[in-house]
Image (cartoon, rainbow, N blue to C red):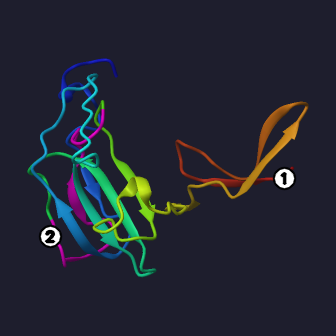
Amino acid sequence: TGSGRLADYGCYGWPVLAPIDAVVSSTHDGEPDNVPGLASNNVAAPEGNRVVLRLATGTFLILAHLQPGSLQVAAGAIVAAGQELARCGNSGNTSEPHIHIHHQRQDPAITPMNLAEGLPLYFDGPHGPWMPAGGIQIRDGRPLAIGVFIDGLTGRSTARAP
């Protein structure tokens, strides 16, 4: 972080893969990458270049801030989990390269992301869930996470009881 050069960000240009089997609902390309560290204030296309997936649940998953010219799919395409969709960029209303992933009930072609009902996301890894299942308890005035914990290096999960 802190650099004004896109190439200095480790995620810039990396492939963005479909996280789930889905149908491409829509795409948008043509937004330029922003200079990192500067506020873009892109209110016309805040998601920048994006791929919108329609899931089997009838909900929508938006993958945003993609690199211009990198989209590998078009509306109507059926994609499989792990398939390359585009590359990580810095387009839209963003200050540094990253991928914004957003799950919503309404079609983003009708209801923009900032006005839609956001829905939870759950991720699985090769050894089980990557998202902790459990919750938070307060002990001695401090929050303590309980439930399944994920080792960030190995992806292995272990259960911890309260």
At horizontal 70% and vertical 54% (from top left) the residue drawn is 158
Image quadrant where residue 132 sits: bottom right
* Residue at figure coordinates x 16%, y 67% from the top left: 73
Establish if 141 lies above or below 55.
above
Q: Is residue 117 left or right of residue 54?
A: right
Q: Is residue 139 above or below residue 105?
A: above
Q: Mark 1 falls on what kind of element?
A: loop
Q: Quadrant of residue 62?
A: bottom left
- The range drawn in magenta is 73-94
Residue type, numbered disc 2: Ala
The residues bearing labels 1 and 2 have C-alpha atoms spaced at a distance of 46 Å
- Disc 1 + disc 2, Cβ < 8 Å: no
Q: Which mark is residue 161?
A: 1
Residue that carries the numbered disc 2 in the rendered image: 74
Looking at this rendering, what residue extends furthest in the right direction?
140
Quadrant (top left, top right, bottom left, bottom right) of the N terminus: top left
Q: Earlier in the sequence, mark 1 or mark 2?
A: 2
What is the x, y in percent for residue 140? 91, 31
Q: Does residue 157 belong to the magenta stretch? A: no
Looking at the image, residue 78 lies above or below residue 20: below
Kindly state the secondary structure of the residue where label 2 is placed.
Answer: loop
* Percent of width and height locating residue 4: 21, 19
Q: Position of residue 82 (x, y in %)?
A: 31, 65
Amino acid type at image mark 1: Ala
Residue at 19% in and 32% down: 34
Residue depicted at x 43% and y 57% = 115
* 88 magenta-colored: yes
In this view, the mark in front (1 or 2)? 2
